[in-house]
Image: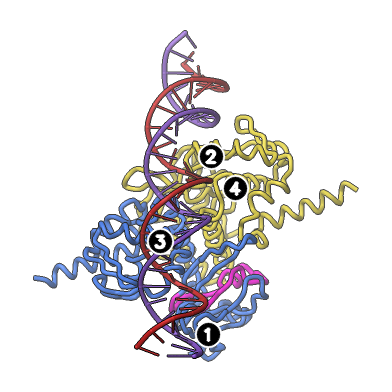
Chain colours: A blue, B yellow, C purple, D red
Amino acid sequence: MEFSRAAHRCRFRKGETVFLHADPALSFFILVRGAVRIHRQTSQGAEITLHIAGPGDMLAGAELFEDRKHYQANATAIEDSVLFAYSHRWIKDRMQKYPRFTMNMLTAVSRNASRATIDREHMSMLNAPQRVGCLLIQICDRYRTDPRNFSLPYSKLTFASRLGMSPESFSRALADLREVGVSVKGNRIRIADLEALDEYACGPCSIAWDCETCLRLQHRHFYQRNSEH
Amino acid sequence: MEFSRAAHRCRFRKGETVFLHADPALSFFILVRGAVRIHRQTSQGAEITLHIAGPGDMLAGAELFEDRKHYQANATAIEDSVLFAYSHRWIKDRMQKYPRFTMNMLTAVSRNASRATIDREHMSMLNAPQRVGCLLIQICDRYRTDPRNFSLPYSKLTFASRLGMSPESFSRALADLREVGVSVKGNRIRIADLEALDEYACGPCSIAWDCETCLRLQHRHFYQRNSEH
DNA sequence: CGGTCCCTTGATAAACATCAAATGCAGTGG
DNA sequence: CCACTGCATTTGATGTTTATCAAGGGACCG
């Protein structure tokens, strides 16, 4: 396929830097395998994790689509990762030629925007344990793991930063979730009753009805229940 | 121009509903004049304002680009407003035909995504007075008003909700800003030293270097200073 | 004049960050 | 194997921030 032939394939080991905030934005990336943390630092040294990208995600999309000359954030591999890198020119040429391709980009960018909007809502509507609960559900959904026994894919520090809370609050929030049937040992998580956790975490979320994760969760329950008979 | 001929022109008075959350998403809108508040409600009755759209903004973009059948939020006019409404089909046909048009959409959607990301960062990095300060700067920038004497375009309740804080906190935050030279009387605001406010509010913001508002602010200072000589 | 609505102010409580200290755990070198 | 080091995590104590509850002020309007 032309799309993979034009790519410059890059590998990054866990901990390596993909690009740095304020460096010249030369490439647009598709993450093929692994995970990359997108993060920024303030002048006071505080850091915020904007996104944890997984396979299929775009990196440095804003720089390409908004014609920015410099990267808007740092990107660090948090697993051994494989990326496809493309020059801005190549992507733009391709968008000129293939409307279908551009439309797919549009869908992907719009999804990012929706996700960021939901994140913001969560910041003001959900307390720490609820946000952590929502995160656990999302992890189960994304990696198709068994909620009854899975492990956190990255460090708790990383997740705390992703949720915009201190590591201490993250730890305490996990502890609080015991009351809704979540048991934690190291980074091993067991969710006894996914539905109860969903009720607890996503109950106060204004978009739960449309939340793709929540919808898939309900599908899953539907099929589980039916397969039990 | 074809773009305005194809539009179904609609007017809404202040307070009227443009569309409702969960209603069938039939149209995509461009706001021509006025202002529209995009907001959602949780099952517990709490409400969050996602965005206050101004002239030139898109409405119901996510529904179009992500192929959603229902509106994802409520939209209420907070000023007498004029909108252009388009059917999804018309826009999609046009995107097929004109790559340039699609690219512009992409830029707009990407900007929305960036804005939402910055909002989220503000929620975790800035305290209430800083967020309010940032808002004041943005208002000055957007409406090209004189920072030394302007009035808030909408109710403080609206702005508080937009910033994800209670009206009480908004009020107190405005009062706190007196210490950096902001005086408030009713909805009349006077910013004595815009640069000082920027330093106070945007100092701890990780993206201030790239923030378009902050950059324009610096331009303005540059020209002001030069014109004083 | 009495109403409503928006806003402000004060008192209190909850949530969360911060600081400090202890624990656990993996890797390292003896 | 064991001490040792560094790092991630947990836990406790404390302080700050913000929401919440309650009451009052002021503008506008009949």
- Circle 3 or circle 4, nearest the eye: 3
Q: Amino acid at mark 3?
A: Phe
Q: Earlier in the sequence, mark 3 or mark 1?
A: 1
Are discs 2 and 3 located on one and the same chain?
no
Q: Nearer the viewer, residue A57 or B167?
A: B167
What is the chain letter for disc 3?
A: A
Secondary structure beneath label 3: helix
Estimate how packed mark 4 is, as few (under 14), some (14 to 19) or many (20 or more) residues with alpha carbons within 10 Å: many
Does the residue at mark 2 contact the one at mark 1 (Cβ under 8 Å)? no
Q: In this figure, which residue is indicated by the disc labeled 4?
A: B130
| A118 is within the stretch colored magenta | no
Q: Is residue A99 above or below residue A84?
A: above
Q: Is residue B7 left or right of residue A142?
A: right
Q: In this figure, which residue is indicated by the disc labeled 1?
A: A12
Are discs 2 and 1 located on one and the same chain?
no
What is the chain letter for disc 2?
A: B
Q: CA distance from mark 2 to mark 3?
A: 28 Å
Q: Is residue B7 visible?
A: no
What is the chain letter for disc 4?
A: B
Residue at image location 30% in from the left, 53% down from the top: A203
Q: In this figure, which residue is indicated by the disc labeled 2?
A: B170
x, y percentage for residue B18?
44, 46
Q: Amino acid at mark 1?
A: Phe
Q: Amino acid at mark 2?
A: Phe
Q: Nearer the viewer, residue B148 or B109?
A: B148
Q: Is residue A94 visible?
A: yes
Secondary structure beneath label 4: helix
- Circle 3 or circle 1, nearest the eye: 3
Q: What's the magenta region?
A: A54-77
